[in-house]
Amino acid sequence: MQAANKTVVLPNFNTMNTEDYIELEQQYGADNYHPLDVVITKGEGVWVWDIEGKKYLDFLSAYSALNQGHCHPKILEAMIKQAQKVTLTSRAFRNDQLGRFYEKLSKISGLPKVLPMNSGAEAVETAIKAIRKWAYKVKGVPENQAEIIVCTNNFSGRTISLISFSTEEQYQDGFGPLTTGFKVIPFGDAEALEKAMTPHTAAFLVEPIQGEGGIIVPPNGFLKQAEEICRSHNVLLIFDEIQTGLGRTGKMFAHQYENVKPDGITVGKALSGGFYPISAFISTDEVMSVFQPGDHGSTFGGNPLAAAIGNAALDVILDEDLPGKAAILGEYFQTKLQSIKSSHIKEVRGKGLLIGMELHPEAGGARRFCKALAKQGLLAKETRDNVIRFAPPLVISQDEIDWAFEKIEGVLTK
Ligand SMILES: *Cc1c(COP(=O)(O)O)cnc(C)c1O
């Protein structure tokens, strides 16, 4: 290889402090996030450390991708073992890890068929492709006329088609032309769902609890009603469980609270316990059978490294009964949070360990409280302007919750 004729001078990383790291990122990175200024270098279980050695309790869990905690040893071991064998085959060939991963996902979801992808957004894109093809090939909707009903305040990811049905102005601003074929109803409104149905409706795509939208829990019975409405119109019911799934809300999947049988679900985030981007669309035979070889794919989707990691990540959720832990500790924690006497708090809500604390607008926004909590060693993040999301790894102990509670109460009452 020819030597480069220009010397690149890299910074001396060993002597860099927090400011230096932030500056380096600011100089070369796109400005599409607004992170808290904590530079993390290590994580273990529910704890992370910044480059200056300060320890924090992680109360965001990478938006619920870390249900199993940081660097879970069993998942780490599976990752290293598989990385030393074979990482990527592409789906042009088969690999010896994928079948077991499918089987496990199918058993925990109660749905027979799995299509693996990488990011959550890709899983939802896959669901939309399946929904549309099902509408044309099975239901008999005229070509290009399929409609998908979604809800206000939804979040499904950042691709062009997914932002096309967002109701957040900023998510769409400047990104047109957008994808058509979506109809928006108010979240939790069964009557509006019934009214929105037409002969061209293919699916109702909904989060059982809205995560990014501010931890919004729909009225009790909404999911069951949605199921009945969908059935009576021959419309698919698809749940986006990317944030709510895999134990977060106190059940393996949040829709299980209402004993609903969806036609498909999307999963991602905790599907790898934070080690790797792994997602999947899981569905009935009828829906998945619309895909023929060549219809859809992904170079990395279903690779043996991902499958081995996914397998281990699911084992941890099952072996450590993380849904059960989330249910018990979530209720304990939410009750405690509700007892805080602070004029800033409008409402505390959620299920399991997916909890939102909505503040009154006069409180001056959730971000300042998140900054104050970070100073106290607790990392939480605002979602929307006025909601603080509390979503620690599900491996958290009651003592650690008590510790966090003291900090939260302190920040809100001082
Ligand atoms: C995070 C999230 C997504 C998108 O996942 P990415 O991996 O960021 O693409 C989709 N749906 C829901 C409900 C999510 O919370």
Image (cartoon, rainbow, N blue to C red):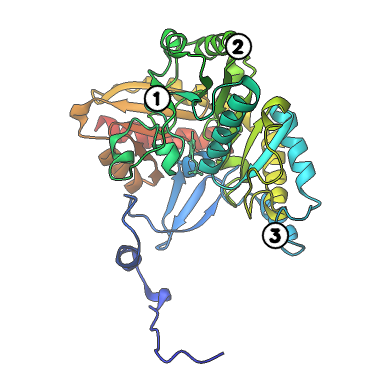
At x 39% / y 89%, what residue is drawn?
A: 6
Quadrant for the N terminus in the image: bottom right
SS for dot 1: helix
Label 2 secondary element:
helix
Q: Quadrant of the C terminus?
A: top left
Please report the residue visible at 41 percent of the width from the left and 19 percent of the height from the top: 187
Count of numbered labels shown in the rendering: 3
Q: Pick whichever, 184 or 223, lies toward us.
A: 184
Circle 3 is placed at which residue position? 88
Q: Quadrant of residue 364?
A: top left
Give the percent coordinates (x, y) of residue 203.
54, 22
Q: Secondary structure at mark 3?
A: loop
Give the Cα separation between the discs numbered 2 and 3.
Answer: 40 Å
Residue where numbered disc 2 is placed:
231
Left or right relative to 1: residue 365? left
Q: Quadrant of residue 59?
A: top left
Residue 52 placement, left or right of 137: left
Task: Please state which of residues 198 and 45 is positioned toward the viewer in this rendering.
Answer: 198
Residue 290 on image: x %, y %: 68, 32
Hey, what amino acid is under mark 2? Arg
Whichever of labels 1 and 3 marks the residue nearer the N terminus, that label is 3
Q: Is residue 30 above or below residue 166?
A: below
Position of residue 64 measured from the top left corner of the image (x, y, whole percent): 51, 39
Give residue 337's mark.
Answer: 1
